[in-house]
Image: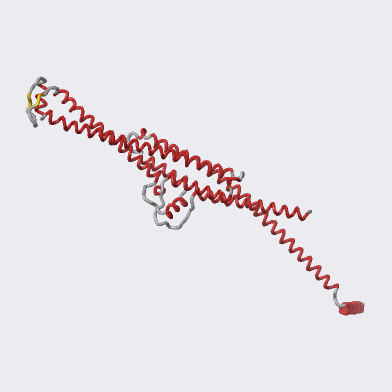
Amino acid sequence: SNSFCTLLALMLSLSNRHSVEVQLLTVQRALKTINGSSSNTPTPSVLAFGDVGLLYFLNQKQAQLHEVLDQAHALEDAELRAINELVEFMRFIVSGLIVEAERVDAASVAVRREIASVTLRMREIDAEIQHLRPRLGTTVDQAIALHFQNHIAVPQRSGPVRLEGMGCEQQALGELPRALVSLRAELRLLSSHRRALCTVQRLIHGNGARVPEAEASQIIAQLDTVTTFRKALHKIKDCVLDVAGKEDLIAVSSLLDFIEMLCSGLTAAMESVSQLHIQLLKHASTIRAARVTERLGQIDARNKRMSSEALYMNEATTLVEDPAVHQSNRSKSSALDDFLTRYCA
């Protein structure tokens, strides 16, 4: 019964030790996946998240995290609650980033349509101006027409024309250039919005160049998630810093708010995982110390047992000696005792 209890306790100790080691290894791999690896190996090119895009970067980080946790069945472990919360938050921010990317894409399409509409209107106005100028003649002809509002024949480039309604046409010719100037200013504003949105789109979807798979994997493995999104946040703020009317870029403002929330939430989730990592390290060190103490106790018990066995073997060897040798030893001892007795007397 005692041996069975000892064996059961040993099995439970080994199981607990293995569970803690697996949990610790899982948490370490999760931290390495999110924080990136600090490799000193030189890379053939500068690793930049803009090459692959934020959406691909975050999606691959989530996939790698799921792969690490699925291998250890960590999602089913109730003790790894912080890891499960991190997985849920990663799933949420991936979905949220997809929504924000769609908003930016829709805003870019809308701005391009507005630019096309303004450009078309400018062409129409320019064509109308080019049509009115020959009919109104030179500046002298227009001055005479303003003075004589009735039926007056004015020499034109294409022949004499009756100038009925000349005042309305001159008024239109004066308003059209002002409208053209206004449309040009609007076009410059829309063009700046388009450039800002294109920059944001490149940050989200990548710069469009085909990145080798090895280099893309290196970018995903080595870059820190929170640091990468903070860099993206500053890049987006820089690209809209000098844009006039940036308050109209609602999609970009929404994306900035989302990235700030993402960085704050991911930092909090990583702090929880780091605390779990510290607890597991303490637990593992306690188990390791108990294992060392147990091992030292086993060594001490073995040494004591070996000493007892050696003493027992020595006594047994003395008892099984040859009787003649034993008698000779006794005789020698008696003779020595008699000699000492006489000498002392």
Residue drawn at point x = 11 percent, y = 20 percent = 149
Left or right: residue 323 compared with residue 107: right
Residue 192: x and y in percent read 31, 38
- Residue 44 visible within the image: yes
Quarter of image, res 212: bottom left
Residue drawn at point x = 88 percent, y = 79 percent = 324
Left or right: residue 280 compared with residue 267: right
Residue 262: x and y in percent read 47, 40
The quarter in which the C terminus is drawn is bottom right
Figure colour scheme? secondary structure
Quarter of image, res 102: top left
Decide: is 270 above or below 177.
below
Report the front residue among 164 and 11.
Answer: 164
Left or right: residue 12 compared with residue 223: right
Report the front residue among 81 and 124.
Answer: 124
Decide: is 191 above or below 40.
above
Question: Looking at the image, which residue sits at the far top?
Answer: 150
Residue drawn at point x = 36 percent, y = 50 percent = 209
Quarter of image, res 128: top left
Residue 152: x and y in percent read 8, 22
Residue drawn at point x = 44 percent, y = 37 percent = 257
Q: How many marks?
A: 0
- Residue 263 visible within the image: no
Residue 103: x and y in percent read 40, 37
Report the front residue among 284 and 25.
Answer: 25
